[in-house]
Image (cartoon, rainbow, N blue to C red):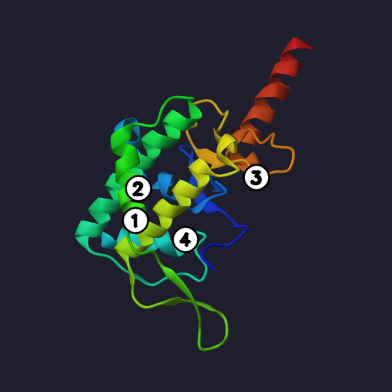
Amino acid sequence: MASRATSPGLVLRSFSGTTYRFDPGALCLELLVTGGPGAFARYEVLHGPADLADWAARSRLDPTPRVEVSEEETAAARRTRDALWRLVLAHVGGEPPPPDDVAALNAAAARTPLAPAIGADGGPAWAGAATGTALLATVARDAVRLLTGPHRDRVRMCAGERCHLVYVDTSRPGRRRWCSMEHCGNIHKVRALRARGESG
């Protein structure tokens, strides 16, 4: 299958050095933690082909693809990711999608994606060579489905102070507020308890 229905999440590290799990709920949103345009450039981790292959190995793609990536494909991944960031921010803010970014995402999605197959052991596998272009097409198609599908109104930004992580709320009640209860959710609870103690 293209991606796991549920994911253990990505392991991220906060500014304080603590690690926590973040499950954005969609493959395409997992790519956004690798950096981005403007202020997000400080988080850039896709410096070369090995970095994109490493991200693929940590993503929700199942089975883990062995991706052969070129420098050009890595640059294309950064451009597409940045376009996706701007599209997601516009979507969350209720603004029209930037036309150039729509075109960039659609162009990536139009390429041939990773093709699922049955492996020699009867389990899931990928057919043919897994290239950076195919990986990017798979991510872009996931983004198109998310931003035009039934969960489009559940794409949200974490309510934590100074947290810009984006996720799709797939919970039944649809009341998820935090990127992770281990991180921003816990920070909020601690602050609320302190505030109650100070006022009491």
Task: Between residue 46 and residue 67, name the one nearer to us.
Answer: 67
Horizontal relation, residue 132 to residue 97: left or right: left
Q: Taking 142 as reference, is 173 above or below it?
A: above
Q: CA distance from mark 4 to mark 2?
A: 25 Å
Mark 4 touches mark 3? (CB < 8 Å): no
- Residue type, label 4: Arg
Asked which quadrant contains residue 160, the reply is top right
Q: Is residue 19 left or right of residue 177?
A: left
The location of residue 52, given as percent across then percent down, is: 34, 59
At label 3, counting other C-alpha atoms closer than 10 Å, the crowd grade (few under 14, some 14-19, many 20 or more) is some
Secondary structure beneath dot 1 equals loop
CA distance separating discs 2 and 1 = 6 Å
Residue occupying the point 73% across, 43% down: 172
- For residue 65, which quarter of the picture? bottom left
- Report x, y in % for residue 41: 31, 38
Q: CA distance from mark 4 to mark 1?
A: 24 Å
Report whether residue 26 is seen: yes
Do the numbered discs 2 and 1 sit on residues whose CB atoms are within 8 Å? yes
The mark total stands at 4
Residue designated by label 4: 58
User: Could you tell which of marks 4 and 2 lies nearer the N-terminus?
Assistant: 4
Find residue 110 and name its label.
Answer: 1
Tell me if 160 is positioned left or right of 194 in this view: left
Q: Which residue is mark 2?
A: 106
Distance from Cα at disc 2 to Cα at disc 3: 24 Å
Question: For the residues carrying marks 4 and 2, which lies nearer the camera in this image?
Answer: 2
The amino acid type found where label 1 is placed reads Ala
Nearer the camera: disc 4 or disc 3: 3
Q: Residue 191 in the image: state x and y as whole percent.
A: 65, 24
